[in-house]
Image (tube, rainbow, N blue to C red):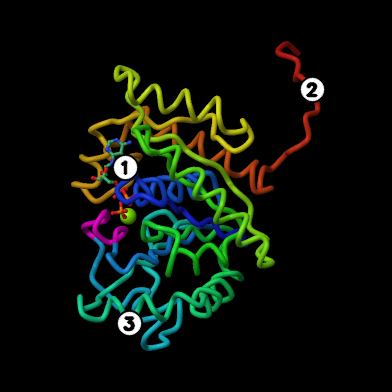
Amino acid sequence: MKVIGVVSQKGGVGKTTVALNLAYALARRGQRVLLADTDPQGGVGLSLQRLQPGPGFAGYVARKLPLESVVVKTRLPEFDVLPMGNIAIQDTHALAARLVDGAELRRLVSDAGPRYGILVLDTPSGFTGVTLGAMRVSTAVVSPLQAEPLAMRSASQLLEVLAALRAEGATLTLGGFLLTMLDLHNADSLGVAMEAWSDLPNAVVFQTTIPRDPLFLRASGAGVPVGLLSHQPPPVAALFEQAAMELEARIGLAKDEKDDGPIPLFA
Ligand SMILES: Nc1ncnc2c1ncn2[C@@H]1O[C@H](COP(=O)(O)OP(=O)(O)OP(=O)(O)O)[C@@H](O)[C@H]1O
Ligand SMILES: [Mg+2]
């Protein structure tokens, strides 16, 4: 099983949106996916408003509940969700403390391993605490790069943290930076994208970019991935399918990785 940590130094850059929509797109592509929320603020649960309240990941950690009793199934057989679940505000600190050393996250990885091909971890912002624990158990990290000033500073911080984790013996790789909330009509936003393309190696930036689009607000209001906003999914949903395809190739899950040349158009 591949574990994808969705991480960023800054808050509000689109981690939960990327984690949810990428996980859904991977499942649509036939991968067996569990999306788990490790953020004590419960971003995934907030984005999926019709999710029934339950013990969730908090119950899994605090009460040692079995994984299958806390996972919520979706209408897509390949896609399950583990929301943060019911947790009192005063208990979030204690829960976060239990996640830092990574033991509970390692238990999640070993319980999920036999059933899923990909575990997507949504994380709190910052490269400390729970997020560091999540990075330690990740195969690869994906970092949304919000196309706004300061994004590049966050990117270099992530590269430093990855280097430090690798020096400790972690084997995680950089799945890539995914430019998001890109506004092609705004010079500052475009400037950040140009900087990312010129300053970061091509191999670490997704070719796919996600635009700033009010449909994401509508989707989180409706409590669904953007691909489920209507029976005819909006074009931005296809961008997540494309990002999912790129990610599969980056983490070694592409079905046919070898370039065997052009396929004839005519019989
Ligand atoms: N591409 C986009 N276009 C427009 N709005 C977006 C886009 N991506 C995310 N948003 C909106 O931006 C807000 C922040 O996104 P999100 O919650 O995914 O960020 P986050 O990094 O998970 O935040 P936090 O650090 O608080 O967990 C949300 O209201 C979300 O709907
Ligand atoms: Mg979030």
**Callout 2, which amino acid?**
Gly
Q: Position of residue 263 (x, y in %)?
A: 75, 20
User: Cβ(mark 1) to ligand 1 < 8 Å?
Assistant: no
**SS at mark 1 in the image:** helix
First along the sequence among labels 3 and 1 = 3
Residue designated by label 2: 261
First along the sequence among labels 1 and 2 = 1
Q: Residue at x 53, y 62 (%)?
A: 135
Q: Quadrant of ligand 2?
A: bottom left
Residues in magenta, as a range: 43-50
Looking at the image, which is closer to me, 154 or 222?
154
Looking at the image, which is closer to me, 180 or 166?
166
Q: Residue at x 28, y 61 (%)?
A: 45
Any magenta on residue 40? no
Q: Residues within 10 Å of mark 1 (few under 14, many from 20)?
A: some
Looking at the image, which is closer to me, 17 or 236?
17
Distance from the alpha carbon under mark 3 to that under mark 1: 35 Å
Q: Which mark is residue 94?
A: 3
**Callout 1, which amino acid?**
Leu
Q: Position of residue 196 (x, y in %)?
A: 50, 30
Could you tell whether 54 is left or right of 240 in the image? left
Residue 247's place in the image compared with 208, above or below, is below
